Image (cartoon, helix red, strand yellow):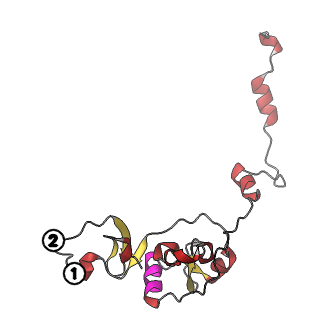
Amino acid sequence: MPLMNETADILGYCDKSIRPQDPDDNIFSLGQILERIQTPAYRWPIRNREERTEISSQKRAIIHARDGGLCRYCGDGGHLLTVDHIIPRSAFPADKLHIADRSDNLISACWDCNEGKSNYENDQRKKMGVTVACWDCANHAHDDEREDRPYAPHLAFCGRCGITRVPELSWIL
């Protein structure tokens, strides 16, 4: 064990190390350093080249309502919004395209973000699906507690009343 007089004067060392900030110094935080490290961009595999089917204007409108009228990539609402596939349609096998075009795989995106994303993987997760009308809206049952209401385990966005639940995935557009 070193003797006390052999150890460095910690307080003196600390005082000498403090100096005024030079504006030309480039000091980076760990977050800034991590932002500069580019992770490789992976593309989804192309499993089909099937013809695209048009997404109905009603479905588009409900998806934009669910997403608050904002691009879910950049957060801007001032642009004309498109509907983008979170997992690209081309990544699904041809027999699963009905899942690719379901609303829980669709998201509001501005044109620039949609085109820039292409078929690269991103950190977006599937969203809640949308439905034109939930069971309560379809049966005009919002005000009264009905005993014959079906059990509804699936969270969805109703085009009439907002966030609700639906009994089956077949209710989701």
Task: Characterize the local packing of mark 1: few (<14), some (14-19) or many (20 or more) Cα atoms within 10 angstroms.
Answer: few
x then y, percent, for residue 10: 76, 24
Judged left or right of residue 136, residue 97 is right
Mark 1 to mark 2 CA distance (whole Å): 10 Å
Q: Amino acid at mark 2?
A: Arg
Q: Residue at x 47, y 76 (%)?
A: 103
Q: Residue at x 30, y 77 (%)?
A: 134
Q: How many tags in the picture? A: 2
The residue singled out by tag 2 in the image is 146
The residue singled out by tag 1 in the image is 139
x then y, percent, for residue 56: 47, 89
Q: Amino acid at mark 1?
A: Asn
Q: Which sits in the foreground, 14 or 137? A: 137
Position of residue 95 relative to residue 9, above or below, is below
Q: Which sits in the foreground, 134 or 5? A: 134
- Determine if the magenta segment contains residue 133: no
Q: Residue at x 48, y 69 (%)?
A: 127
Magenta stretch in the rendered image: 59-68
x then y, percent, for residue 169: 38, 71
